[in-house]
Amino acid sequence: MKHCSAILLLMLFLACYTFFACAPGESMGGDFDKGESNMEENAFFNGYLAARMGDLVYFTEEKPLNGGRRIYVYDSASGEVFPLCAKPDCTHDSGECRAAYPSAFGDLFMMPYGDRLYFLGDVERKEDKTYLRIYSQASDGSDRKIESKFKWELGSYVVSFVGIYDGIVYKLGSTIVIENGEQYEEISLCSQPLGEDGEVRELFRERVQDPEFMGAMRAGKLWFAVYDGDGNCIMHLYSYDTETDEINTEFEGKAPGYAFRMAALEDRLVFHEGRTVFAYSFEEKAFKEMLRSDDDQVIRYGGVMFEWTGRFDFRCYAEDGSLMHEGTLDEALFDGPPIKTYLGCINGKFCFLFECGGGDGENEGAHNYFVVYDSQTNTFSVPWDSDMK
Ligand SMILES: [Zn+2]
């Protein structure tokens, strides 16, 4: 599982390296009261690839088309999938389609904020400075506009989390710093108000060798966890309070395992997407292991837990770790062996993107499927594939 994360980070790193000599990478966030990006709903989503707003799940396809890739919407109530496009008579197959998005990275880092979808887009260079445009679009696919330009003078190769709270964008990322010929990696948290003239503030910076790190936000508080790169599960867990502007160390020491994503819930943080799922209780200020994979597989948490135990074999566990379901997905539904990408979980429905075929770096020729596992009914559905428009 270190594997997945490392590949993702490497891809980001390479993408960034290719597009700018020295720039950013990223991820997502939010919550409502102050008109902020909705992290409570999005606790179970991976902002790189997907985001939730109410019953709707936004996701992007892997397969490029003329003018870029598209944003799709899965309506979890009706089970339908459609492109995020309000252009009349659009055939959704050209760069003119409003669902096609401009992106510096390929992935989007989506942030539902208020009633609009925000995302990190393409790069603009002006007077020797590089900016990353933040776009927003109405939830029906209309009215796309540039909301802000994130200044990258704090240069970040990899962004692990981006969220908006009370009109301010927060970004957690890491940067390569070269000092006296030595190369170091530094993690930083910075903020910038939405709008053209917002000043970047650096809230946190720390040097760590080969770190794994992740962030999550809920109700004005941002948590971020950093593993030392020594393979001993030593975690530094920090919180940033947007009200008091304070950074606190919540925990330092050995965690029950490695996880690559965290969800911020009301009373705890849940760490998952590793071989161990574990929680950090705010009240007890301690970790508790929830589930460990017998087969060294990655486990995803979405209220209940899901594990692929083989190419098409799966298990689903209740919150207390007891087995709810196990079974096999019908492989005849797909063109071949899939690469499975986890997008997130909405009301107990685990959403995946399957990529079959393709093979070169551009994914040309790949056949993609949007696959949903409903843990309540123990059934799979495939409401979309890339042969559909
Ligand atoms: Zn269209």
Image: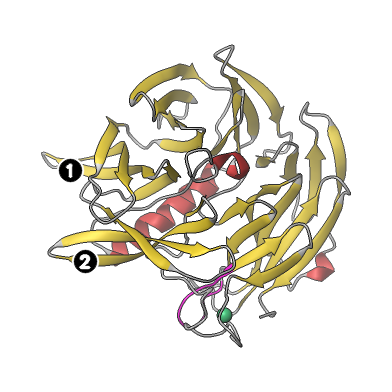
Dot 2: what SS? strand
Quarter the N terminus occupies: top right
Task: Identify the residue shown where x is 50% and y is 19%.
Answer: 254
Q: Main secondary structure of the magenta part?
A: loop
194 is higher (above) or lower (below) than 126: above
Crowd class of label 2 (few under 14; some 14 to 19; many from 20; radius 10 Å): few
Residue at the top extreme of this rendering: 284
Name the spot of residue 147 as percent of width and height, x first: 36, 59
Name the spot of residue 51 as percent of width and height, x first: 58, 53
Identity of the amino acid at label 2? Arg
User: Can residue 336 be seen at all in this image of the molecule?
Assistant: no
Q: Are marks 1 and 2 in contact (CB under 8 Å)?
A: no
Location of mark 2 (residue):
125
Report ligand 1 position as a quadrant: bottom right
307 to the left or right of 49: right
Task: Identify the residue shown where x is 81% and y is 65%.
Answer: 331
- Report the front residue among 56 and 366: 56
Point out the frontmost of discs 1 and 2: 2
Name the spot of residue 318 as percent of width and height, x first: 80, 33
- Report the front residue among 273 and 313: 273
120 to the left or right of 218: left
Q: Which residues are magenta?
A: 63-71
Identity of the amino acid at label 1? Ile
Q: CA distance from mark 1 to mark 2?
A: 23 Å
Location of mark 1 (residue):
178
